[in-house]
Image: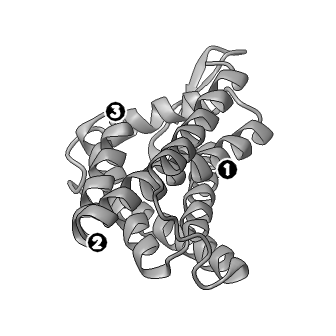
Amino acid sequence: MSSNAALLFQGGIGVLGLIAILVFGIPVLLLGPGLWPSIFYGAFGAAGTYAVLLLLTRVPGLFPENLERQMQGLYEFASRYSPAVLILLSLLAGIGEELLFRGAIQGWLMAHTGAVTSVLAASVLFGLAHYISFTYFLVATGLGLILGAAYVFSESLTLVMVWHAVYDMIALFCLLRFPRWFGVTIVDPGRNCHHE
């Protein structure tokens, strides 16, 4: 997928979420504790979430499938793009996916059901949207639960947008900078050899 297509796709998710919010009149809790606290707690939450997930990948047998194969695919996807494009993709994912899943879907469900049901349902849909394997679905659903709960308690969509965007940036940086942490094999096209 070209850089423009990837950016357009992520941007389109946000547009879809915004349209749903406007058409259905879904109430959005935007800032909660305020702009700077939302940014700070969002960034802090992202770093903490990534650190915990990284530690969990070190637990033998916790993930039943070959997580290294999925990381290899993600590495090959991310390595096609420049750092600027990856930052933009992370920002668009944070803003767009949170507009859709937390703002629109969870917000609508919250108005018609309750906090627990809305968080669970939006998180499962978030996991399904990221499905590349059952393991990845579980991880994405877990992240969705964390983001959904953070939205409920903080009353700040901005906070979860920052959390999501910064999490993606950290994950992509670590994967590209330290691929061996994830069992990624790097192919050197100049020498046609593998490094692990």
Sequence-earlier tag: 3 or 1: 1
The reply to whether residue 58 is visible in this rendering is no
Task: Work out how far the residue at label 3 is from the one at label 1, CA to CA, in angstroms.
Answer: 22 Å
**Do the CB atoms of the residues marked 2 and 3 lie less than 8 Å apart?**
no
Viewer-proximal residue, 10 or 82? 10
Query: Residue drawn 53% across and 74% down?
Result: 45
Q: Tell me the SS state at disc 3.
A: loop
Position of the N terminus, as image quadrant, is top right
Please report the residue visible at 59 percent of the width from the left and 36 percent of the height from the top.
10
For label 2, the residue is 115
Q: Nearer the viewer, residue 111 or 69?
A: 111
Question: Could you tell which of marks 2 and 1 lies nearer the N-terminus?
Answer: 1
> Disc count in the image?
3
Q: Are marks 2 and 1 in contact (CB under 8 Å)?
A: no
Going by the numbered disc 3, the residue's amino acid type is: Ile
Q: Position of residue 21 (x, y in %)?
A: 50, 51
| Residue denoted by label 1 | 91
Q: Residue at x 55, y 42 (%)?
A: 19
> Which residue is label 3 attached to?
132
